[in-house]
Amino acid sequence: MDVNLAVNIAAIVISLSAVALSAFFGLRQLRSMRRANSTVVAIELLTRECRSDAFLDSEEFVLYELSSHPPDGGVNGLRPEHRRHATRVGLFFSSLGALSVFGGIETKMIVGLVPTRARRAWVALEPYILAERQLRSPTYLSFFEHLVCLIDDAEPARHHASLNLRRMDPLSGRSRIEAGADGTGSGAGAAAVKV
């Protein structure tokens, strides 16, 4: 009787372990699939959208013309064609911020690819975003703001130096890895490179 009970308990333990392992690997696979779907969106945003003529026109308007319009009415207070430009740029960077928050894209990729563009757009849009938050929605483009904070926290120049990006030596015309302060080029203690 005791042997049968032990065998039954062992069988139950083995069965429960198999179910637990199956559930664990199933959840990992599900997370991996979700991440893969987000990666496609990130690639689309980073390669196609920010290089499209429509986006570049909107970015140029936001950076060089938007400030001639008062921010008092927020983004929605702008004329429709101006609002379209501001919204396109704001939503682009907000989407990148959301992808970083939800794990769809690595923060280091964003910091490496769009730091200057994101900060310049934030500086231009900030008064309109803050007015929009006051007037209509307290969370308006909050993922965009989060993105800019991530970029500032990461110090893009130091981040780039840690990636061991290759550079062309202006004297020899040959490529090299930017050497760190310790001379290794490993990124540990790497000197900040102005990019």
Image (tube, rainbow, N blue to C red):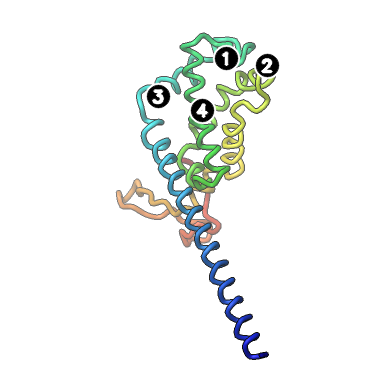
- Res. 91 mark: 4
- Distance in Å between CA atoms under marks 3 and 2: 28 Å
Kindly indicate whether the residue at mark 1 contacts the one at mark 3 (C-beta within 8 angstroms): no
- Element marked by disc 3: helix
First in sequence: mark 4 or mark 1? 1
- Element marked by disc 1: loop
First in sequence: mark 1 or mark 2? 1
Looking at the picture, which amino acid does disc 3 mark? Leu
First in sequence: mark 3 or mark 2? 3
Looking at the picture, which amino acid does disc 1 mark? Asn
Kindly indicate whether the residue at mark 2 contacts the one at mark 1 (C-beta within 8 angstroms): yes
First in sequence: mark 2 or mark 4? 4
Kindly indicate whether the residue at mark 2 contacts the one at mark 3 (C-beta within 8 angstroms): no
Which residue is located at x 61 percent, y 15 percent?
74
Disc 4 crowd, CA 10 A, few/some/many (<14, 14-19, 20+):
some
User: Which residue is the site of mark 3?
Assistant: 56
Rendered position, 131 above or below 193: above
Looking at the picture, which amino acid does disc 4 mark? Leu
Relative depth, front residue between 121 and 140: 140
Relative depth, front residue between 165 and 135: 135
- Res. 76 mark: 1
First in sequence: mark 4 or mark 3? 3
- Res. 135 mark: 2
Judged from this view, the residue extending furthest toward the left is 173
Q: From the viewer's perspective, is the residue at label 4 or at label 3 nearer?
A: 4
Relative depth, front residue between 190 and 172: 190
- Distance in Å between CA atoms under marks 3 and 1: 21 Å
Q: Position of residue 39 (x, y in %)?
A: 44, 45
